[in-house]
Image (spheres, rainbow, N blue to C red):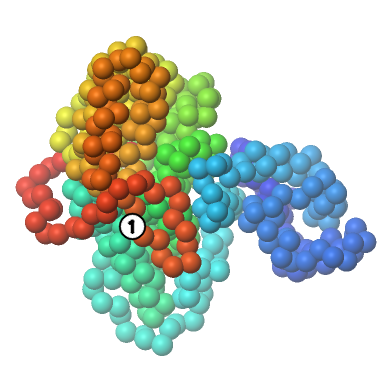
Amino acid sequence: MTPFPPGPRLLGPLLAQLRLARGWSQPRLAAELCAAAGVPTLSRHEVSRWERQLRVPGDFWLGWLAVVLGAPVELLRSAATRSRALGAPPAVPGAGARSRAALLALAQRWLADPQAPLLVGAPAGLAVGAPPGPAESDPPDRDRRPPDELRRLDDLCGGADLAGLAAGRMRRAVRALSGAAPVARRRLLPVLAESAQLAGWLAADAGDPVGGLDAYRLALRAATAAGDVALAGHVLGSASHLLAGLGDPAGALVLAHTGYAGVRRHATPGLRALLLHRVALAAALDGRATAARQALDGARRAGGDPPEPGREPSWLYWLDGVELAAMTGRTLVALGHPGPAEAPLVAARRRGHPRGAAIYGGWLARGYLQLGEVERAGAVAGEALLDAVRAGSPRALGPLSELRRRLAGHPHEPAARRYTALVAAAGPYLPRAPAAPPGRARSGAPPGRGRVVTASRIPTGTAARGRTG
């Protein structure tokens, strides 16, 4: 009997799992369905669309899928219902909807079998077992090192400054892997996985959700091929954070749950706490208060305060007690309990990094509005808006746009009028996402002027941390 992953299942990954358990290709499944149903028009392309979550079959084909694959029809119908409920929200249009669906399907395939060859179909040279490329020599040193320097720059500059650098490094890692000898490939896979995860994070911060989702998908494939279960879970947690910021809490919750379920036996305390915070925020935004509180309790038990130095992966160097407390505060505001959220959010804003001050300031202002303190909300929102300009982070503008709408409900309050005027004055200086590559439309890019990073604009001698969870 085919084992199934725990928790709610999506239909696409479930069909792929059942098909592969029988050793069938997509054309073979299509042929079996046509023979059983007496309908000769179903092709492998339709099977592919089902497995990639781009379409959900109706009751007719669900019944025949149950017959051909030997699966309970209620299991398939339940998975189909869940897949339909996760239809792309308005905030993820066009190409982003396809990228989202592909990542959701890949995540559940990973959870069902962490050793699955997820790199099949990846860019040239990334397929597991691919023959060596024409160049058998080791790649340059710069392409064999994890992107630690770029991660540290992310503490100081926003995604509008760094997304292009991260994307370039990811492309170099792909080229290096495709041209490397087999031994070198094993060393390069972890580098590619970390580079793609960081590229996804910075693309999201720069207001390019499609680029972020695509980079996360590549990162998950590479981390799986490298055998790095912890990094794979972190990739899914980062992708969950992206979808939560886009107003897609349902998709965010699936990714966060999947990431945590896949790594909880292997993760360090800090990583477990971080993934549980991803679950908590997505659940709170999705209106699942009980689940959010349970995840917060689990994060509190898992993470410690602060996480022990030296026990966490290098890519979690930024996670400490202040950051974890601020994540708790953010979720409490999302749950409508702003009182206990004030202290940790204020502490996070005082760390000195403008992006963190902008993001957590937005949540703090939202909490003040919930308490009816419009004057304090307007003042904090104004400071956060200026911090977003300094940071060059289009992602930081999302909560502030929501704040503008909420403050608009208080038209007679001086604080609301001042904030509206400040938004209008700051418009020409707000960070904007980089131009989309040819052939891919940019979605969700905030208006304003782009920023160019130069050596003179990178601060030195600071310990501020900007990886706002």
What residue sits 31% from the left and 67% below the top?
168
Q: Residues within 10 Å of mark 1 (few under 14, many from 20)?
A: many
State which quarter of the image contains the C terminus.
top left
For numbered disc 1, what is the local secondary structure?
loop
> Where is residue 458 shown, x and y percent of the image?
13, 53
Q: Nearer the viewer, residue 250 or 451?
A: 451
Residue drawn 34% across the image and 11% down it: 372
Q: Position of residue 218 (x, y in %)?
A: 45, 61
Is any part of residue 326 visible from this angle? no
> Within the image, what quadrant is residue 132 found in?
bottom left
Tell me: 159 left or right of 82. left
In the drawing, does residue 138 fall left or right of residue 209? left
Of residue 85 and residue 389, the one placed in the foreground of this image is: 389
**Placement of 145 over or under 158, stated as above or below:** below
369 lies left or right of 42: left
Extreme residue toward the bottom, this view: 134
236, above or below 373, in the image: below
What's the amino acid at mark 1? Pro
Residue 395 appears in the picture as rendered: yes
Q: How many marks?
A: 1
Label 1 belongs to which residue? 434
Q: Nearer the viewer, residue 370 or 192?
A: 370
Residue that lies at the very extreme toward the right in this rendered image: 38
Which residue does the image show at 9% across and 56% down from the upper left? 456
Seen in the picture, residue 344 relative to 130 is either above or below; the reply is: above
Q: Which residue does the image show at 50% across and 43% down from the upper left? A: 91
Residue 4 position in % (x across, y down):
66, 46
- In this view, the residue farthest toward the top is 372
